[in-house]
Image (cartoon, rainbow, N blue to C red):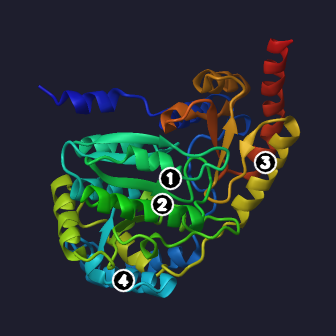
Amino acid sequence: MINQRMYELGAAPNKIRELFAYGMDRKAEIGAEKIFDYSIGNPSVPAPDEVLEQFQFQLAQDPVIVHEYTPSPGDPNVRQAIADHIRRTFGTPATAANVYVTSGASSCIAITLAAIANPGDEIIAISPYFPEYKTWSENAGCTLIEVPATTPSFQPDIEALARAITNKTSALIINTPNNPVGCVYTRASLEALSAMLRAKEEELGRRIFLISDEPYREIVYGADVPWVPDLYEDTIVCYSFSKSLSLPGERIGYIYVSDLIPDAGDIFTAVCGAGRSLGYICAPVLLQRVVAQCLDVPSDVAAYEENRRILTEGLADLGYEFVEPDGAFYLWVKALEDDAVAFSERAKDFELLLVPSDSFGAPGWVRLSYCIAKETIENSMPAFAKLMEAYANDRA
């Protein structure tokens, strides 16, 4: 006998990964240069030189030490380095005692939900949202409640969020810069959100955590990304180096339980227990020590910014509607029909791989990941023109 729920999750399609796998097959069949793959957020910018240097340095050390176990929450020196970085960058009183090193942002959120929620609780996500929020919430025995963002800005809808909060709500997840839209939540939006959550905590006599999912924090184009723990006391930060240091396949990140939480130590103990119960302990040690030496290395966003310019100018000239992104490396484009899945399938006829919005909890859009080669974007414009023409011919 097997766990039926796990079987269903294994069998359920993940549209992003499905398109990515389809693209790999098509590239093998007809050549990579003929496929315009906007499916997955796989950084095209190489990791900074400092990362390679640290890999080489660490591998030159005593191999017994290089590959040894660390304590479950991570190497104490690495945790201290992360806390020091948070203090330097945001001026907050971060301590190593509240840093838990993880295998990427996915385990961050899974651990955090398991730590702060009880079976039967509700978790709120602002749609569109990263699809796995639902999986991780349900695995914690919770129900994910979707609250649509405002349009066309895609900022949090504070009134709608307030209506969605009940005496079962344990947390709200925010993701800014946002995947899939590319919007950045403004300070005014986050201040209003924080004030509303404090009022709800007082009204319900119940703690409501704010989980700030931040893998794209450094990937911005002039926008200000407020430090959420400064705005709301009960904040837990989930961070990944996948995008900032172009290390998506290495799976390294951290949870930071804000030191401003009065009982931060108790929350962190629950995080440690959740990590233990889920098997997310002792994140890859080589990677821990590499990133600890690269915390202040700036992200190279110039290539993404250029790709954003080429893509938005090209699609605008063709008549596509989209949300101008202020961060991350995704473009949220209005589908040319109501059925985003059907639109995505039709785009395949022109070798365009576009992720339909249904899996993000929103109808009628597609997500384009533009962290790809500039030439791929430039060469895809005739395909986008043909796709637009095909729909124009349908209406003629």
**Marks 1,2: beta carbons within 8 A:** yes
**Kind of residue sitting beneath label 4:** Ala
Q: Residues within 10 Å of mark 3 (few under 14, many from 20)?
A: some
Is residue 59 in view from this perspective?
Answer: no
Residue 266 vs residue 28, the one in the foreground: 266
Question: Which mark sits nearer the N-terminus, 4 or 1?
Answer: 4
Query: Disc 1 on helix, strand or loop?
Result: helix
Dividing the picture into quadrants, the one containing residue 152 is: top right
**Kind of residue sitting beneath label 2:** Leu
Q: Position of residue 175 (x, y in %)?
A: 49, 56
Marks 2 and 4: which is nearer the front? Answer: 2
Query: Disc 3 on helix, strand or loop?
Result: helix
Name the mark on residue 312: 3
CA gap between label 1 and label 3 equals 29 Å
**Kind of residue sitting beneath label 3:** Thr
Residue 10, placed above or below residue 71? above
The N terminus, quarter of image: top left
Question: Which mark sits nearer the N-terminus, 1 or 3?
Answer: 1
Marks 4 and 1: which is nearer the front? Answer: 1
Residue 62 vs residue 334, the one in the foreground: 334
Residue 116, placed above or below residue 152? below
- According to the image, label 4 marks what residue? 94
- According to the image, label 2 marks what residue? 193
Name the mark on residue 158: 1
CA gap between label 4 and label 1 equals 29 Å
